Amino acid sequence: MVAHSAAKLGHKEMALWLELTRCASAKTEALTSSDLAKLCWAVSKLDLTNEFPDFWQTTEDAVIGAASTAQSVDLSMLAWAF
């Protein structure tokens, strides 16, 4: 996923993150637990959590639902992100 790779590279281009979080928020039902984990981890890793409050509000329910089917690596990323 682009978000995970961009975060690993330390890429904080706000236009990119605005679009990534906007698209993810619009399609949370289509994201897998791994997608959600990587995206949430990436936003947190770059310390952008306060920049996108709407993203966190819209993905909250999806994350709770995904946690029941997530693999341990995804659970650890979600826990770290939150």
Image: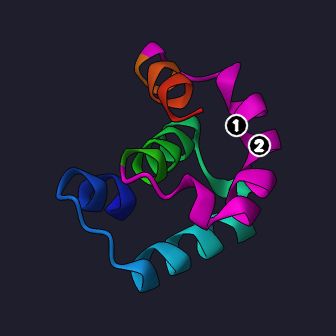
Q: Name the residue: 25% across, 56% down.
A: 5
Residue at far top of view: 72
Q: Is residue 67 left or right of residue 9?
A: right
Q: Which residue is mark 1?
A: 63
The amino acid marked with disc number 2 is: Glu
Q: Are marks 1 and 2 in contact (CB under 8 Å)?
A: yes
Q: Name the residue: 71% across, 56% down.
A: 28
Q: Name the residue: 43% across, 52% down.
A: 47
Range of residues picked out in magenta:
46-72
The residue nearer to you, when weighing 37 against 41, is: 41
Q: Which residue is mark 2?
A: 60
Residue 67 x, y percent position in the rendering? 67, 24
Label the magenta part by its dominant secondary structure: helix
Residue 33 x, y percent position in the rendering? 58, 36
- At mark 1, the secondary structure is helix
Residue at far left of view: 9
The residue nearer to you, when weighing 78 against 48, is: 48
The amino acid marked with disc number 1 is: Val
Quarter assignment of residue 54? bottom right
- At mark 2, the secondary structure is helix
Any part of residue 45 in sight? yes
Quarter in which the N terminus is drawn: bottom left
Mark 1–mark 2 Cα distance, whole angstroms, equals 5 Å
Residue 49 vertical position relative to residue 27 in the rendered view, above or below:
above
Quarter assignment of residue 10? bottom left
Quarter in which the C terminus is drawn: top right
Residue 73 x, y percent position in the rendering? 40, 20
Any part of residue 27 in sight? no
Structural crowding at the residue carrying mark 1, measured as other residues with C-alpha within 10 Å and reported as few (<14), some (14–19) or many (≥20): many
Residue 60 vertical position relative to residue 26 in the rendered view, above or below:
above
